[in-house]
Structures are given as structure tokens and as C-alpha cells.
Image (cartoon, helix red, strand yellow):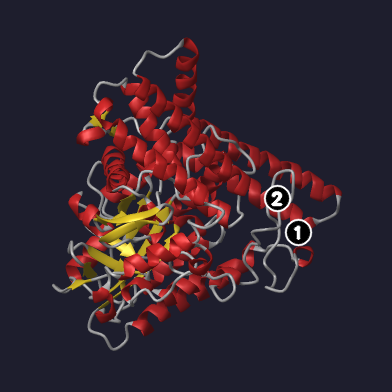
Amino acid sequence: MSDKCFLLVLHSHIPYVLSHGTWPHGTDWLFEAAAETYLPLLNVFRRLTGEGISPRVAVSFTPVLVEQLKSPAFREGFRGHLKMKSAAADQDQRHFRRTGEPELERLAFFWKDTYDRLLADFEETCGSDIVASFRRLQDEGHVEILTSCATHAYLPLLSEDESILSQIRQGRMTHRRHFGREAAGFWLPECAYRPAYDWVSPLAGGRARPRAGVDQLLAQEGLRCTFVDTHLLRGGAAKGVYLELYPGLKNIWESSRGGRKTARKNPRDPYRPYRVHPSGLPFFIRDETTGRQVWSRDIGYPGDGWYLEFHKKHFPGGLRYWRITSGRAGLADKAPYNPDRVEERLREHAAHFVGLLEKTLAGRKRGLIVSMYDTELFGHWWFEGPEWIYHLFRGLAGSSVRPATAAECLERIPPPPSLIGLPEGSWGEGGFHSVWLNNSTSWIWEKIHSLEALWKRLKPKLGSADGRLVKQLIREKFLLESSDWPFLISTWSARDYAEHRAAEHAERAFRLAAWIERGQPLSPEEETQLSAWERADFLFSEVPGPEGRTLA
């Protein structure tokens, strides 16, 4: 086997949206990801294995995403979504025929055929179970499945190690239940990492207290490896502009520097795995060069003029009929999409990527390139992305650089025995925490930290409390801790929706905690309210309860 390895890591995550809206924010996010990304990728992986090519891809699934994909509500709603898109294409065909636009009329037929095939794939090939389909690929040895935090919590900013452990334990528990084995590795949400040091709250300040590093908590829970961004290996020089504008962030940055003295001695070679100090947990480093080729719409493949334009849609169905055309073209100047011209560009871009891998590792006896992306980039944001992956792995079949899973990479290129001290940071803009903690989002963290403190005070009462109340409190706490809410607020992607969701889960959690603290039976009105919350926020049939117990 080759000791020049390529590890493609796809991170799959959608926040909990079932029972929380449809369009423009809500279940349509989940339906679009399933239709445009998860099903097309399954199709690509099946085609590759049918041709005798094992993709050896590492795919992470957050527990909150898995729970949604397994939900009967998702399955029924997703069928309706696919049928609605097919009907919209039918309507568009008639419209474009009336308006004398034959190119767009042909594209409407293309979309109808696409959604009809997706429905057939979902019901017949997948048996209406996307998670089970990925599990079969795992069991056949073609993909490696990673887990992550329960609800994609931003771990460095949680104020209690117990909260971090609960997020990790839920990830392991949900993974075992749906994939039938321990996870091959752990995806840190937003690649956000914090080492061990005397931590001071970025919100409240106060006396410093010792905190375990995120790596130590992962190792404690038996996780096998994780992934970090490049700048963490090289000393963590990147830091966000909010450090000067938001004093709490500046305090935590200065505090973290005391725990990363060894980072200045770190090696500069990102093409191998290492072990983090002090836990010894193996970690992989994201490759910047290959990352830009796929992430960037400006200099990367997704910005090619022949590919489908994401932002211009035809309503009421929301289907897309135009290509990017050029980076300078406004939406009014986009030319019609031509699927027949895309195949040639995909082959060229896949061949270029293979050449880039070979060039990067040229002259080395062994080496590892780790390319890490959000799964939803392929298909949802970059419509042709899944097909590009197909051509990429066909090209790698004849290359000196061979695809490998994380476990295989650790076996072929084991990390050196010396341990590496990593600084605090993430793969967010600026490399630190400012996307998630800033003046617009600090109120969410105030609620999270208050709830963490309240949970500690409640612990003596939890053993005798109503199990339903404790279980729902854990669910609402998990949902409040989701990194999506501050991210959507900071980026203005869905600011009102995110603010509402964070406030809603906080209100429910504090109300549940008050009922537990009161220690009396619920009134009929409170019982009705609890039942409504259980229906709306039903995920994780088993949760990690107090004192390490599992609440089923």
C-alpha cells in the first residue's frame, strides 16, 4: 500500500429544525441537504464501489443530524419536498413554453427528471433511510464514519467540563445506536480547540480555575483521533479583530497563551499526524492549499463559469436555471445553465486536484494530505460537487497518492512519540472565537453559562426528580448550546431565526429547571406544556444523565 495518502473528511451537520419552521429557515435546510448532498453522495459512492473503487472517505455525522434523518417526520416531509420540486419543474416547463424560452424549458425537464430520480433513490435504493445506507457503506469497508458533539456545541466557550463531556458522551451514544460500533474519530465543531490552563470566564471574569483541555476530555471518553486547523499547528498566530473590540475575548486569549508555551517549538510539516500534549490523542491537520481549491468561489473550482449559479432562482418553485457565467456577472446577466458542458470541466478540475496532491507530496517517501470540508458544500452550494468527487476518486485510482481512512493513515504514517502543544483557536474567520462570541452573541453565552451553573446546583435533586423533566432539560440544554445560533447571528445568515431559537430553548430549559427545583407534581397546564416541548424537541431517546447514568 502507498505511504502517500489522501484523507478526504466530510463534516455533515444541520441544526435541529424539525418542528421549528419550514421556509426560508427550518426544515427546508434539512430537505435541501438530503436532496442535493446526501443522496447524490450515496449515489457517487455506490457507483465507485460498483466500478471496483473504494472511496475510503471519512464522513462525520453530528448526532443531531442523524436523529433528524432517522425521524419519521423527516421521511414523510422529505417525500413531500421531492414531489413538490418535481411539480414545480412541471409548472416551470409550461411557463417557459408559453414565454418562448426553449433552453429553460429543457432545463425544467432536467430538474423534473432529477427530483423524480431522487425520490426513487430515497424510497427504493435507500429504503427511506439515509443513515442506514451510509452504515452499509461503513460495514462494507468503503467509508469511515466519525461522530461529533450532540448538537455541534462550540466547546472552548462552555464554562463547565461536565457540559463538554455530556456533548461528547451523547455523540458516542448516538453513534453506537445508529452505526453499530464505536466512532472512528471525533470532529470538533468548527475545529474549535482549547488546551488545559487556568481559565477565566470571557463574560464574568473572576478568579481563574484549572480546566482540562478538550483533547483530555476526548481521550478520557476513548475517542481515537480528531482534526484541527493548520494555524493551530503553526503556533496560532491568527486571531480575530474582535479581540480589541470585545474585552472578554481578549481576556480569554491572554489567559490561553500561558498554556501554550510548547506551541512555539511546533514542527512546520502539516503532512503527517501528531499527538497533542498532554493526552497523546492523535490529530490531523487541515491542508490549506487543497482547501482553497474547493472552498473558494473566487479562486477555486466552484466559481467556474459553467457551473450552476447558487443565488439566482426561479419562483415559486425555487429551481435554478442559470450558470455562474463569470465572477463579474450580476444576477440579471447570468446565462442559462448547460449540463452538457459541465462534464468536461469536472474531469479537468478533478485531474488538476490529483496533480496538486502529487505535486505537494513529490520528493517525499511518505506523506498525508488531509482535505476537510462541510459535506453540504458538495451538491448544495456546489451543485456539481458530488460528481467532482466521483471523477476525483477515479483519478486517484491511478495515482501515487492513494485515498485512505483516518484509521489507515494512523497505521501507515503513525504520529511521532513526542507530544505537540496546541494553542486555542478554530477554523473560523480570524482563527479564534470571534464569530461565535462577540457583542451580538454574548447574551446567548450568558444564558448558557447561567444554565450550566444552575445544573450544578440542581444535581443533588436530579436523582429523585421526575425523569421526564430531567431528560427534557438535558435536551433543551443541548439545543441551546448549538454553535449554529451565534454563527447565524454573526453572519446575518438567519439572524432573527437564530435569536428566536436560542431564546426559546433557554426559556424552556430554565422553566424545566424551576419545576425540578420546586419538587412538586406538575399542574395540568404544565403537563400540557411539557408534552408540547417533548413533541417539538424530541431527539436522543437516551441521554447522559447525572453521575454518568444513562436516562432512557
Of residues 523 and 104, the one drawn nearer to the viewer in this rendering: 523
**Numbered label tally:** 2
Task: Give me the residue at 20% from left, 62% from top.
Answer: 281
Q: Quadrant of residue 331?
A: bottom right
Q: In the figure, is residue 373 to the left or right of 137?
A: right
Task: Give me the residue at 37% from left, 70% from top.
Answer: 286
Q: In the figure, is residue 64 to the left or right of 497?
A: left
Q: Pointer 2: what residue?
A: 108
Task: Give me the residue at 40% from left, 49% from top.
Answer: 153
Name the amino acid, label 2.
Answer: Ala
Image quadrant occupied by the C terminus: top left
- Residue farthest right in this picture: 99
Q: Quadrant of residue 467?
A: top left
Q: CA distance from mark 2 to mark 1?
A: 9 Å
Q: Give percent across and percent down for residue 135.
A: 32, 45
Residue 311 appears anywhere in the view = yes
- Binning the other alpha carbons within 10 Å of mark 1 as few (below 14), some (14 to 19) or many (20 upward) gives some
- Residue farthest left in this picture: 417
Residue 117 appears anywhere in the view = no
Q: Quadrant of residue 457?
A: top left
Q: Give percent across and percent down for residue 456.
A: 30, 37
**Mark seen at residue 241:** none
Of residues 343 and 331, the one drawn nearer to the viewer in this rendering: 331
Image quadrant occupied by the N terminus: bottom left
Label 2: element kind? helix
Name the amino acid, label 1.
Answer: Glu
Label 1: element kind? helix
Q: Give percent across and percent down for residue 162.
A: 27, 44
Q: Pointer 1: what residue?
A: 103
Using the image, determine if residue 448 lies above or below residue 145: above
Task: Give me the residue at 60% from left, 70% from top.
Answer: 303
- Residue farthest bottom in this picture: 363
